[in-house]
Image (cartoon, rainbow, N blue to C red):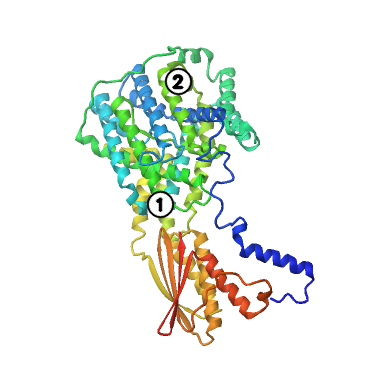
Amino acid sequence: MASQGLPSPIVSFLREGYNALVHRADYDDPLHPRKKPTSLLYDVDSYPPLLVRFAASIQHVFLMSVSWLYIVVIVNAVGGTTTQAQDIIRMSMIAAGIATILQASRGILGSGYLCPLSSSLTYLPSSVLAARTGGFSLLLGMVAFAGAATGVFSRVTSRLRALFPPEVTGLIVCMSGLQLIAIGCPRFVGSLGPGSPPNLRALLIGAATLLAIVCSTVWNRGKFHVLPLIIGLILGYGLSLGFGELPWHQFQNDISVSWFSLPHRVAPGLSFQIAMVIPFLIACLTANLKTVGDLTLCQKINDADWRRTDMKSISGGLLANGVGTLFSGLSGGVAQNTVSSTVGLSLATGTTSRSIALPAGLIVIALAFFPKLAAVLAAMPAPVIGAMLIYSACYIVIGGLQLLTSRMMDARRIFAVGIALLFGLSIDISPNLYAHAPDFLRPIFISSVAFATVLVIPLSLFFRLGLSNKIQFRLPRAPAASDAVHFMVEEQGAAWGMRREVAMRAEQVMNEIVNSASVLNPALKHLDVSLAFDEMSLDGMIEYEGAPLDIAESAPSFEELGTDKGIAALSKFIICQYADRVRVKRRKGVSSVLFHFDH
């Protein structure tokens, strides 16, 4: 491409554009964006102003409080009293607050992310079964056992990376969001039981609350942008009291408890039964896998350069879950697990600072000693709860889909994810379909998340059978090789689950190597290619008979591009720029170009 004969302004423009491309270190590289996403106001390591931290923590506490309803279900299922339910809730609150603080710490204990914990829906059927079988002492003993089992599982998680490719964690996150919809939508329209018709008054309150939350998120870029739930809650409570959805006398009765009192253990002692081990281990496994999905999403939303799940962080996060659940069982509470809706809130508000975990945890602990304040949260109107869950679910579902589609997918991966997705949804669509499942398997069928999680991991492993991580093939010389390179990279990249960005760079490098080798060796007939992939890297080698490539570390000048030598130098420079490492070897007349990509 000669520059002779072009007007000088055009030459200057082309020169500046060319320099911008080859000197990418001075510009934003779309292939390697900055680590802090621009959508975040306060990322994981930021320290928001004290008032923002306090207000944000209050919003997380609101979402954590929704899970206390599961404790009421457990107590009612075994004919317990309101006092017993309150005792278990208060001890569970203390455990949740401690676990939330631990989860945000870094190291062996904690993931280093803001991902609050609360009472777990996954443990609901096994908890009911234990309470019916041996009373509350057996329930607490088995919860403590589940906490210890979670701690053990956390120590081996780092060796199980192959079980958690992005399509698996993405599906788990997506199903967590869909489960929030299944819980939130009936409350949003005021339908609180089987066959209960929608309530127009509740629907209007829910719609107004959701609209207030969404508007404060979308159009408010000031300080109130990080406080959408508080705005929605004030409006929702006001409308519920004003229109009678929450009658004033009922609200007064709900909060007619003492301001301060010490929490009490619901039952003395702990007990253990071998028959309860399998139900609690199943619940433990599904709860842990849900946590893997939640923490993976936390990692992704805090890093614009996210590539894969950080298993060290996951291991610490699971250990925090285990400690929280163990403490809860020993002190008189139920099993604890991460709250997916809080991750959605963090993403929606752009506030993911782990410094928020401390005030959130302390507030939950304090509420256990101030029953009147906790009662205000417990009296939250159903349509307001529904609006909050739907709001969070939007971000959770989309975040899960982004994780799921962050890698190329072939038929194997599509079927693994698709089958698990469809059968998981069947829990919410046809809940009676699994009504006759054995008791020890009930934890699998308690929620769409649990069932989909239990299915997707073995399906993912099954569909990998017969798939090698190495391939070899032969390419013709340029220009005929271009289509073959594209086909092989697309097909094999999808089978391996490569990031598309790495696949595109690999295709570019292979084409440039073939083109340069063909120009350098006019008699060249074919080239032999071998590729090897694992989750961490893609390594390749192209061999051919002929003169070796002289890899260029620097770009040719703009003026040199008008010559064949300059074009060849540019091609070699591109190879170095797109591959993370390149090496050239020659032995017995055979030249080899080895290239490596971090993945």
In the picture, the disc for residue 419 is 1
Which residue is drawn at the image coordinates 51% and 12% (left, top)? 249
Callout 2: helix, strand or loop? helix
In the rendered view of the protein, which quadrant contains the C terminus?
Answer: bottom left
Q: Position of residue 317 (x, y in %)?
A: 38, 40
Relative horizontal placement of residue 204, taking residue 586 as reference (left or right): right
Nearer the observer: mark 1 or 2; the answer is 2
Residue type indicated by callout 1: Ile
Q: Earlier in the sequence, mark 1 or mark 2?
A: 2
Q: CA distance from mark 1 to mark 2?
A: 41 Å
Q: Is residue 519 above or below residue 249?
A: below
The mark tally for this picture is 2
Q: Is residue 547 visible?
A: yes
Q: Is residue 419 above or below residue 534?
A: above
Relative horizontal placement of residue 554, taking residue 463 as reference (left or right): right
Q: Quadrant of residue 326?
A: top left
Q: Is residue 197 visible?
A: no
Using the image as rendered, state which of residue 491 and residue 204 is in the foreground: 491
In the rendered view of the protein, which quadrant contains the N terminus?
Answer: bottom right
Using the image as rendered, state which of residue 152 and residue 294 is in the foreground: 152
In the picture, the disc for residue 569 is none
Q: Position of residue 377 (x, y in %)?
A: 48, 22
- The crowd level at tag 2 (other Cα within 10 Å; few <14, some 14-19, many 20+) is many
Q: Is residue 461 above or below residue 62?
A: below
Using the image as rendered, state which of residue 469 and residue 305 is in the foreground: 305
Q: Position of residue 444 (x, y in %)?
A: 33, 41
Q: Residue furthest bottom?
A: 523
Disc 2 designates what residue? 374
Residue type indicated by callout 2: Ala
Which residue is drawn at the image coordinates 68% and 77% (left, top)? 562
